[in-house]
Image (spheres, helix red, strand yellow):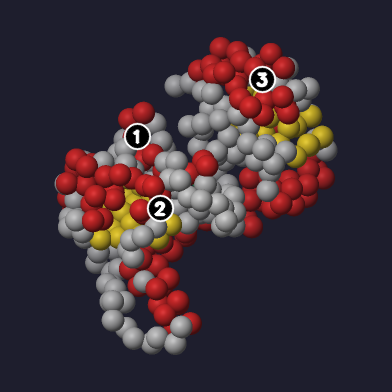
Amino acid sequence: MKIAFFSTKPYDRKFFDLANEKFGHEITYFESKLRRETLKLAEGYDCACVFVNDQIDASVLIALAAQGTRLVALRCAGFNNVDINSAKELGVAVVRVPAYSPYAVAEHTVGLMLALNRKVYWANSRVKEGNFSLDGLLGFDMRNRTVGLVGTGKIGECVANILNGFGCEIIAYDKFENQACLDLGVKYVERDELFARADIISLHCPLFKETYHLVDMDAIAKMKKGVMIINTSRGALIDARAAIEALKSEKIGYLGIDVYEEEEELFFEDKTFEIRTDDVFARLTTFPNVVITGHQAYFTEEAVSAIANTTLENISSYEKGDDLTNAVTPD
Ligand code: NAD
């Protein structure tokens, strides 16, 4: 199939070229993100292959369909950037990679917790400058701390497994209880109870209308003073302005984020010499108790290789007219 591949990075080419030896698709790599302004690039291609910060809204889908594109292949799990209803109306199929390595994201999540708790980022730069003082580096044992997981799907379950090994008490909020988590001893509670009891809150639910700004002023008010909040899911689960106020008042004691609501214009690019115009993001970077990574939780060899294989397999299934097990459809 002829694939217009958007938002390409050198590592995408490496993994997709290797995986494509098995599938034999005709891939053209574009560095640009897919959006209204770059639509023309997809002209004549059956499939647009996209990532987390491409914008596939109704107007983009209408144009894609008119240009003959019949398939949008997401090379990620989340699909909040695609207007699924419009795609259905237009007869454009949408496929995604529902699971590649939940371990990758879960391990990064716990990495953020430990980095914040033990202040690894401070300690490393201090030691390199010849400062071996321990002042300000005091951490806490993870054992016996209460961790609240919002969302216990594939990634939440992996996080629960890791933290169980640490001896944490794990509570969770999800619409559906996960049997593997129950078997581990995870206790399901209401969302407000989770907010009130957890020392560490980690977000692992998708971004929907109902989860938009799940962590806002009201939610933060219900939390323990000094709470640690970790978000490796989607940026807009947290109201960043509310988080800044709570960091200033020390209600939030630690914040670790791999995703940011306005990350689209920042993440995955080298902006070293550019003037920063996002004042909210800039403020977040000034706090000593905030660690930010640029949407890299998924970024392991195993995960990227699985993404490449599943994406190309999804495209082959569509081409052959097989059942699309990884199709995204309206509820
Ligand atoms: P999943 O579908 O396996 O699990 C999501 C869970 O959230 C489900 O159990 C679901 O019932 C629950 N949920 C839905 N609505 C909820 C709500 N309102 N409140 C609480 N729980 C709710 O998904 P997953 O594979 O575990 O991924 C979780 C999220 O992680 C994805 O949606 C994606 O946005 C994000 N993600 C981030 C990265 C990264 O690199 N940072 C990589 C992969 C996935």
The numbered disc on residue 64 is 3
Residue at the spot 30% in from the left edge and 39% down from the top edge: 214
Q: Secondary structure at mark 3?
A: helix
Whole-Å distance between the Cαs marked 1 and 3? 28 Å
**Nearest to viewer (mark 3 / mark 2):** 2
Identify residue for label 2: 282
> Is 94 rendered above or below residue 53?
above
Residue 44 image position (x, y, % from top left):
78, 22
Between 255 and 208, the residue placed more toward the observer is 255
Whole-Å distance between the Cαs marked 2 and 1? 22 Å
The image quadrant in which ligand 1 is located: top left
Residue 327 image position (x, y, % from top left):
58, 27
Mark 2 vs 1, N-terminal side:
1
Residue at the spot 32% in from the left edge and 37% down from the top edge: 213
Mark 3 vs 2, N-terminal side:
3
The numbered disc on residue 154 is none
The numbered disc on residue 212 is 1
Q: Secondary structure at mark 2?
A: helix
Q: Amino acid at mark 2?
A: Ala
Q: Amino acid at mark 1?
A: Tyr
Residue at the spot 53% in from the left edge and 27% down from the top edge: 82
- Quarter of the view holding residue 52: top right
Could one spot residue 88 in this view of the protein?
yes
Q: What crowding class fits label 2: few (fewer than 14 Cα within 10 Å), some (14-19), or many (20 or more)?
A: few
Q: Secondary structure at mark 1?
A: loop
> Is 31 rendered above or below residue 146?
above
